[in-house]
Amino acid sequence: MKKTLMLMALVLVALPALAGGNPHKTPSGWFDMENCEFCRHLVADPELLPHCQWETLPTADGMMTVMTVEPGYEASLAQANAAMEAFAAKMHGGQLDPTKVKLCGFCQAYGQLLASGVKMETVKGKVAEVTLAHSGDPKMVAQMHEIARRNTEEMAIMMGGTVDPHAGHKH
């Protein structure tokens, strides 16, 4: 269950950048918020994502995701997080067949990290969350660096081609 909660936190941290009136899916399917069983909870409130910022950064032994939500949207974020955690509990409780659960590429990649033993820690504040993912295995570190790179690239596609992961967001 702890790993599931970490997965949910990572999804929550990275996906809010899909806001700003852009489609919620990249052509590759890396991001697909409306069809991914986890991510769809983040678009349930259409006001949530336009009021979030995120960044995924490589670190010496993995990656770090930082997400902030504007004051006043904390309850919406908590509701989305609770819905994702409830869904994960059903998966891990055997109520759902994990092979039939539709996930975007992003959620699949994080699930693979968790299954591979990557250590994760999420620190939650009132309007910010930071998740640190790390490993002593150089192959896993390289995989996390690739995820951080791909998140930035795919977000650029979602945000209209800019390389700034915060483009289109309020600062």
Image: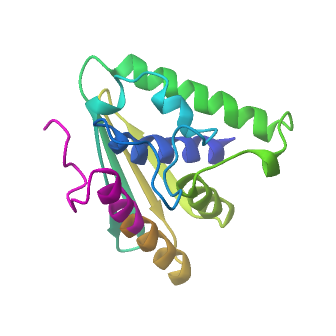
Q: Is residue 9 above or below residue 158?
A: above
Q: Position of residue 145 (x, y in %)?
A: 41, 72
Q: Is 101 in the magenta?
A: no
Looking at the rendering, in which quadrant would you find the C terminus? top left
Residue at point 59% right, 32% down?
84
Q: Nearer the viewer, residue 70 or 152?
A: 152
Q: Position of residue 124 (x, y in %)?
A: 39, 35
Horizontal side of 24 relative to 47 (left or right) equals right
Looking at the rendering, in which quadrant would you find the N terminus? top right
Q: Position of residue 31 (x, y in %)?
A: 48, 51
Q: Which residues are magenta?
A: 150-171
Residue at point 39% right, 24% down?
46
Would you say residue 56 is visible in this rendering? no
**Residue 59 quadrant:** bottom left
Q: Position of residue 10 (x, y in %)?
A: 48, 48
Residue at point 35% right, 21% down?
74
Q: Is residue 105 above or below residue 83?
A: below
Q: Is 155 in the magenta?
A: yes
